Image (tube, rainbow, N blue to C red):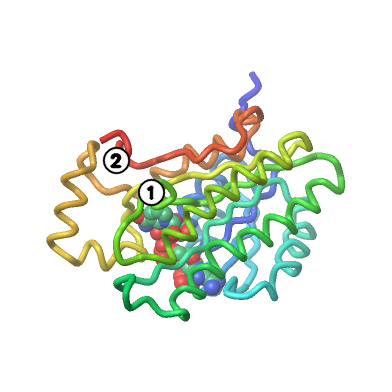
Amino acid sequence: MHNPFDLSGKTAIVTGANTGLGQGIAVALARAGAAIVAVGRSAMTETERLCREAGARFHGVEADLATLAPIERIVDEGARFGGRIDVLVNNAGVIRRADAIDFTEADWDAVMNVNLKSAFFLSQAAARRMLADGQGGKIINIASLLSFQGGIRIASYTASKSGLAGLTRLLACEWAGKGINVNAIAPGYFVTNNTQALREDPKRSAEILGRIPAGRWGDPADLGGAAVFLASSASDYVHGIVLPVDGGWLAR
Ligand SMILES: NC(=O)c1ccc[n+]([C@@H]2O[C@H](COP(=O)([O-])OP(=O)(O)OC[C@H]3O[C@@H](n4cnc5c(N)ncnc54)[C@H](OP(=O)(O)O)[C@@H]3O)[C@@H](O)[C@H]2O)c1
């Protein structure tokens, strides 16, 4: 029987795949049958092992997404390895914490460049490939609860993730009719490097946990199902959504 979630024969680029949510997504896509192109500035050793254990082909691309310099090389290498690019997951992201009154231009640019600018231009480069052979594809942006909420002490992060949600809708409007699905996932509070400072602050940590209806922080594996759904033909008529995977946080 046809399985609409099967990714056999597909190639997925995942940025920031060495750790955290990117690793969880890469492994989930690998388990669903996709070949993985893992992009990032750190060694992909553990992700490579986990993807290969899942039976997937794997290719690592060393790239620092703080600038646009590696963008063409990433899609070139991805297409050469996979034959074509079927899925792009814009997961790489950074966060900087400071009161808005003291927030620096450096902390603004560092976050906006990776979280928003590189995500847009990598989407553009991948979409050009997806459109060139007429087969379309799937683009998944990793947004945040800060795509919906304000947060505190993370001005550039909130701006970047709110921007990414808007960009997801814009790209969906432009490319839905051309066979490319652009959607986003908004993870809630997950145990990764990104949230280390929050988890080490006993007061904030307890406040956050007390607001999560599921009663626990997310584990990177919790994102896998949403990623496979949005990467697969099961979501062919889904465009421009920002899908929360948040243990019920936004329902509260
Ligand atoms: N954890 C959460 O609760 C949560 C919630 C909502 C959204 N998110 C989003 O989920 C995504 C993944 O974050 P995470 O929680 O898994 O945090 P993480 O463990 O800090 O992972 C971030 C990833 O992005 C990569 N990255 C950062 N800057 C980069 C650059 N200049 N070039 C290439 N790669 C770069 C990191 O590589 P290095 O390891 O080399 O730094 C790492 O692979 C981010 O977009 C984050 O905003 C996380």
Question: Residue at the spot x=46%, y=79% of the render?
Answer: 105
Can you tell which quarter of the image residue 32 is in? top right
When the figure is inspected, residue 35 is found, relative to residue 201, above or below; the finding is above
Rendered location of residue 72, percent (x, y): 75, 67
Categorize mark 1 by other alpha carbons within 10 Å: few (<14), some (14-19), many (20+). Answer: many
- Distance from mark 2 CB to nearest ligand 1 atom below 8 Å: no
Q: Position of residue 175 (x, y in %)?
A: 73, 41
Picture disc at residue 239:
none
Q: State whether residue 76 is above or below residue 212.
A: below
Dot 1 falls on a residue whose secondary structure is: helix
Residue 145 - label = 1
Amino acid at dot 1: Leu
Please indicate, yes or no, whether residue 107 appears anywhere in the rendered image.
yes
Q: Quadrant of ligand 1?
A: bottom left
In the image, taking residue 186 as reference, residue 176 lies left or right, namely right
Q: Is residue 34 left or right of residue 179?
A: left
**Which quadrant, please, contains the N terminus?**
top right
Q: CA distance from mark 2 to mark 1?
A: 9 Å
The structure residue drawn at horizontal position 64% and vertical position 45%, both measured from the top left corner, is 170
Q: Residue at x 66, y 30 (%)?
A: 236
Mark identifier at residue 249: 2
Type of amino acid at the residue the image marks with label 2: Trp
| Foreground of the two, 119 or 226 | 119
Give me the residue at 50% from left, 50% from top: 25
Tag 2's secondary structure? helix
Circles 2 and 1, Cβ within 8 Å, touching? The answer is: yes
